[in-house]
Amino acid sequence: MIVEVQPLAGFDRLLTYEVSEKISSQLKVGCLVQIPLGRRRVLGVVFSLDSKETIDPEKLRFLGGLIQPEPVLSLDLIRLSKWICNYYSCSMESVLAAMIPAVVREGKKAKNEKWIQLHPQNKKGDDLKSAPKQQELFYKLKEIGKPIRKTKLINELGFGLNTIKGLITKGLVHEVFEIVQREAYDDELDDDVVESKWELTPEQKEASRQLEDLLQKKKFGVQLLHGVTGSGKTEVYFEAMEVALDQGGGVLFLVPEVSLAPQTVARLRARFSKRNEKVEVWHSHLSGGERLDAWRNLTTGKSRIVVGARSAVFAPIPSLRLIVVDEEHELAYKQEDTPRYHGRDLAVYRAMLNEACCILGSATPSLETFRNVERNKYGLSQLSKRIDGRQLPLMHIVDMRLDARRGKGGSVLSQTLVESMRERFEKKEQTILFLNRRGFNTTMLCTDCGFVEECKDCSIALTFHRTDGYLRCHLCGFRKVAPRVCASCKSIEIRKKGHGTQRIEDLVSELMPRSSRVVRVDADMMTKKNLFRETLRDFRLGKIDVLVGTQMIAKGLDFPNVTLVGVIDADLPLRMEDFRASERAFQLLVQVAGRAGRGDRAGEVYVQTYAPHSSSIQFSRKPDVYGFLEEEMEMRKELEYPPFRHLIRHIFRGRSLEKTEFYSNQWRKKLEAEPVPGLEVKGPALAPIEKIKGYYRFHLFYLTASVSSCLKQLKKRREDFPLDPEIHDILDVDAHQMS
Ligand code: ADP
Ligand code: ZN
Ligand code: ZN
C-alpha cells in the first residue's frame, strides 16, 4: 500500500510512503501518522490511500507508525483544507495548524485515569486475614462505596501499589479507566436563564417552517434570516437545530465572539440539555485539555452540538446537518492572520461539502450576503417585528455642526445628550455610550460644515499624516498637501484628531452628578475575562449608571434597564479609509439602537453626527435596512467594489521604509509590464498603520471577478520577481481590514 501524507511541519507538499502490512488494515484517510522526513521523524496526516505519483521504489520509505486509529480529520475537513489553501493562497501547513488543535496535532491521547472499584459480587473480605493491609483496603473501599481514583488511594490514603495489586489478582477489586472530563464554561451558566419554550410568534413560525422545508430537502442550501434586533432570531435557530438533530445530524452554531455571547451559550445549554444533548463550547481560551475533551466528545459521537467563534468552523462534528452563523455581517469572522479565512464563507462552503444547510442571521446583513439573496443563490426569511410588539427606540439625530448644541462637552458631548443622561440617572435608569475607537490616522473634518476631503478615484476619505502634512489616499496612494481652510465653506475649524475612550470616560464623569458611577469597557478588558464579566454583571445589577464602550458591547447583550443610548461619533466610520465605512456606520447604528428599550420601557437613542444627511444615518433612523442596502449596492456597483468584484490586498513589509517602498513600486511596474487580464490594480500606498513592530507596510489592492484565475497569474508573476530577503509579502483575499 502506498499513501500520500501531508507533513504537519516543515514541508509544504504531499509526500508518498509505503505502508507495512501491520498498519495498512487500520489506516484511514485523515489519520495522524509518524513519517520519516530526511533525518527527522515528524507527524503528518494521511490525505490519500492511493498515490498517483510514480516513485522510484528504491527511494520509497516506510511510514513510521499510526498514532491513533481514529482519523483526526474527517473527509469534509480535508476537502475544506484544500479549498482554503487555494482560495486564500496559503500553505497547507498553516491551514492544518488552524484546523487541528495543537493537543491533537501533537498526538496526545485523552487523559486516562485509573480508578479502583470493588467487585460487586465479592462482599466478604474474611479470608484476607493473612494479608492485613489488603483487608484494610478492602474494608475502606466498602466504606467508600463507590469507585475511587487510584492516585488518591496511594497519595492521600497511604495504600501501597502492591496492596492494590494483591486485591486485583485475587479478583476482589478491579481497575477502571475513566476519561477525565474538563468542561469549559461551567461557571458561565447564568442562573437567571431558565429557558421555557415560548409560543412562537406568527413570524417566527413562518421562518421556522421555511427553514424546516429547507432542511427536509436534505440538500445544500443557504438561508438569510433577516430579523430586526429583538425579533427572536435565536428561537428560530433553535427550532431549525431541533429539526437537524431529529434528522440525526450535528449542528454548528457560530457567534462572532464567545465571551460576548454568554447569554446565547446559556440559552443553548438550557434548551438542549432537555434533549440530553451536550453543547461543546469552542473558543480560543480553552486549555489544551479542555479542547482535547471537546474534540474527543465530538469524534466519538458523545456530543454533536458546538457553539463557538470563527475557528469552531473546523470543529470535527460528525454528519453535519446545519450551520448557524449569528450576526453574519460581523468583522470578527474574518481571521486577520494566516490563514486569512472568512468564517462565514467557510461555513457556507463546509455546508456545501456536507449537503447541509447554513443559516446566516443578522439584523443588518452584509452586502456580500444580500447580493447572494438578490441573485437567488440564498433564500430569505424575515422577522420584521420585535417580540411583544415592543417599539424600536426613538432615534434623535444631534447635528454637531451647530455650535449651539455643544455645551461644556465641547466637540465631544452635546448638551442634549448630557441632559438626557442626567435625567435617566435621576429616574434610576441606565445609559450606554458608544464610540468608535478606531482612527489611528485621522481624516480632516470641518466641524462647521461637516466636509471631509475624499479621493476622487476611490471615494474614500483622505487621511492626514502629521509627519509631512500631506493628505493621502490609502487605496491608490494619491496625495496632496493638507489645506488650511475647509475647501467647502472656507472655515478654519478643521479638526484632525479623534478622541479615545479614556478621555470620554473622564469627561462624562465630570459632567454627571457626583454620586453616579461611570465605567468604561475597552478592548484591553476583553483579555481579562473575569473583569469584563464582572463589569457586565455590575451593570446588569444596576451598580453602574453609565457604561462607556466601543461597538464590541453593541451586540448580543440584553439589559432591560437601559433606556438611553448615546452614539458619540456616529460618522467616524464614514471618514475612515475604507469603502465599507458607510456599511459599518449603518450596522453600528442599528445594532446600537437595538440596545435601548429592551425591557418594558421605551428607549431613546441620541446620535451625534457631522454628517446628518448621510445614508447610513438617515436609513438607520427607521430603520430601513433594504433602503440602505439598495443605495449602498448602487454605489458599490458603480465603483465595482465588493460584492461585485473580489478585493485582494497585497502587503509588503520590511524594516527599511525605502526598500519596502521600492519593492512594492517595482512589483507594480512588473504588473504593468505583464498585466493580468481582468485585474484592476491600485497602489502601492503606505498602509494607514504605517509601521507595526518596527516593520513598514505598503500595500496594493487588486479587484477581480475571479479569485482563482487571478491568483494563478499573480503567483506566476511573483515567481520571477525576486524579493530582497528583508522584505516579506502577504496576500489577503477578500480583505476586510484596510489598515
Ligand atoms: P434577536 O437575536 O433577534 O435580537 P433574541 O432571539 O435575543 O432576539 O430574542 C429577544 C428576546 O425575546 C429574548 O429575551 C427571548 O428570550 C425573547 N423571545 C424570543 N422569542 C419569544 C417568543 N416567541 N415569545 C416571547 N419571548 C420571546
Ligand atoms: Zn466647512
Ligand atoms: Zn484613491
Image: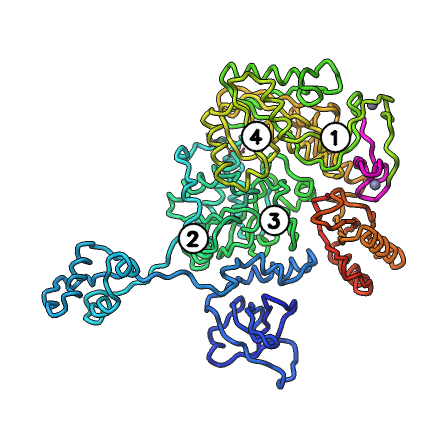
Disc 4: residue Cβ within 8 A of ligand 1's nearest atom:
no
Identify the mark nearer the N-term, 1 or 2.
2
Helix, strand or loop at label 3? It is helix
- Using the image, determine if residue 42 lies above or below residue 699: below
Q: CA distance from mark 4 to mark 3?
A: 29 Å
Magenta segment main secondary structure: loop
Disc 3: which residue = 343
Disc 4: which residue = 520
Closer to the eye: label 2 or 4: 4
Dot 4: few (<14), some (14–19), or many (≥20) neighbours within 10 Å? some
Dot 1: few (<14), some (14–19), or many (≥20) neighbours within 10 Å? some
Q: CA distance from mark 4 to mark 1?
A: 21 Å
**Quarter of the view holding residue 53:** bottom right
Q: Could you say where residue 677 lies in the image, as x and y percent from the top left? A: 84, 56
**Quarter of the view holding residue 386:** top right
Identify the mark nearer the N-term, 4 or 1.
1
Closer to the eye: label 4 or 3: 4
Q: Amino acid at mark 3?
A: Gly
Q: Which mark is residue 497?
A: 1
Q: Amino acid at mark 4?
A: Arg
Q: Could you say where residue 636 lies in the image, as x and y percent from the top left? A: 77, 39
Q: Is residue 196 visible?
A: no
Disc 2: which residue = 303
Is label 1 in contact with label 2 (beta carbons under 8 Å)? no
Identify the mark nearer the N-term, 2 or 4.
2
Q: Nearer the viewer, residue 172 or 587?
A: 172
What segment is highlighted magenta in the picture? 451-478
